[in-house]
Amino acid sequence: MGHWLSAPEYQAARFAVTHLIALTYLIGFACFLRQFRGLLGERGLTPVARFVERVPFRRAPSLFHLRSSDRWLAGAGWAGVVASLLAQFADLAPLWAWLVLWTLLWVLYSSIVNVGQVWYGFGWESLLLEAGFLVIFLGPAHLAAPAPILWLLCWLLFRVEFGAGLIKLRGDSCWRDLTALHYHHETQPMPGPLSRAFHHLPGPLHRVEVLANHGTQLVAPFLLFAPQPVASVAAVIVVVTQLWLMLSGNFAWLNLLTITLACAAISAPPVVRPDPPGWFAVPVLAVTVLFVVLAYWPIRNMLGRDQVMNRSFNRLHLGNTYGAFGSVTRVRYEVIVLGAHSPDGPWREYEFPAKPGDPARRPPQIAPYHLRLDWLMWFVAINPSYGRGWLPAFLRALLRGEPEVLGLLRHNPFPDAPPKLVRADLHRYRFTTRAERRATGNHWTRTRSSDLIPPTSLDDVG
């Protein structure tokens, strides 16, 4: 590969990107191993085996079309963990080994995402796959970094940030009148330990936060392609904003991945490395041409009036469009699931690992780990139709006391025998005021709003 393809001032950037992507892969595979039996396993809520029976390979390319037993799923997850750990040391490997290892990571994780159904419908899944695919062609650190791939990583960051900025301006009016953060910290999907403190910041500071967000997402992305040091300054602005978001809530590994992509735009003193072999220029240029072609769909989406968020335009999850929080909920509702041995009770509440439940419990720090069931329960509180494909199976699993599904919860209130009845109520939640916090010690105050699912027996959901 000629010197014209090399970027010696981005050797440090390449090192940061590859190691952080490997870390994110590791988190993704760890989440899969911890949760797949309850969500996708043979006794899970939406089994992979049932999915691959009705969805052909061409619509969902995955290794799990070959076999989809729990043992096979676990084997793929552990292979991903091992490969993620090896990727931290892949800079010591020859180029061919680098290509094999990073391709294996991408194939394994794309196989999971493509059969993951509703549990893997989040934008950061496609973002990890797209970034992981590009890292295949960065090559190890003992060779010169290919400039076209670094530019493509910046283009990916541009789509993440600018797409999110556009969807906010076009969507909810609270982003335009600068009031979005009067609500967002309280109503976001998965609040964190500091979310309540952020919610109680003064109103003028909330407006400053929104203005800063617009600047980061609508202006800074264009500066990523400016000459240095302007591009590095724009990348640092993105990093600082993402750190602020990490402090204020739990967004799985979205913030970590965005910071990782920003590293690709930060230059450092040049470090000269030998050029990769000449043949490597062929796949690098081929991938560059591929992404230039694929750019048509996200550009059309961003410029069109009917912009959508987090859409993959192909089965390989390459050249996607991104975005988040085009609308902001003003009031927080939570689904509270309870069980009892008789209609007269006592009714005992099922606690989830992170979603709000017990008002006295401080929201935990979860990110960059991702609790998929907790996230989906937030969507169900907004619109129960989000649970139509799995919520009956969830209730059935509670009534049967199935350990795979109970393992997704914080604790089982019926350790001796499963309940005869379960129900789901809708509660209105808000953060306690400072006076309420001093008086009660609670982080939340909640008020029962309505029934979501009336008392239900195993016969009702059988």
Image (cartoon, grey):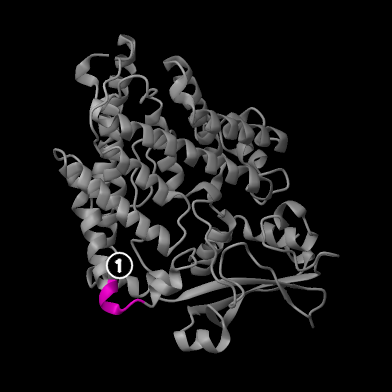
Residue 58 x %, y %: 50, 30
- Classify mark 1: helix, strand or loop: loop
* Residue displayed at 35% across by 52% down: 309
**In the image, is 50 to the left or to the right of 173?**
right
Q: Nearer the viewer, residue 454 or 266?
A: 266
Q: Where 380 falls versus 266 (above or below)?
A: below
Q: How many marks?
A: 1
Q: Is residue 370 above or below residue 232?
A: below
Q: Is residue 50 magenta?
A: no
Q: Position of residue 450 (x, y in %)?
A: 58, 80
Which image quarter is the N terminus in?
top left
Residue type, numbered disc 1: Asp
Region rendered in magenta: 201-206
Nearer-the-camera pick, 34 or 200: 200
Which residue is drawn at the image coordinates 38% and 49% (left, top)?
Answer: 310
Picture coordinates of residue 13 (x, y %)? Answer: 31, 35
The residue lying furthest to the left in this view is 227
- Up the image or down, 227 lies above or below 387; here it is above
Quadrant where the C terminus sits is bottom right
Residue 259 left/right relative to 147:
right
Q: Residue furthest top?
A: 278
Q: Residues within 10 Å of mark 1 (few under 14, many from 20)?
A: some
Q: Quadrant of residue 417?
A: bottom right
Q: Is residue 234 visible?
A: yes
Q: Residue at x 52, y 79 (%)?
A: 428
Let me know if residue 314 appears in the view: no
Measuring from the top left, give residue 414's x and y in whole percent: 79, 67
- Front residue of this view, candidates 449 and 260: 260
Name the residue that disc number 1 marks: 172
Q: Is residue 186 left or right of residue 300?
A: right
Q: Quadrant of residue 262?
A: top left
Magenta span dominant secondary structure: helix
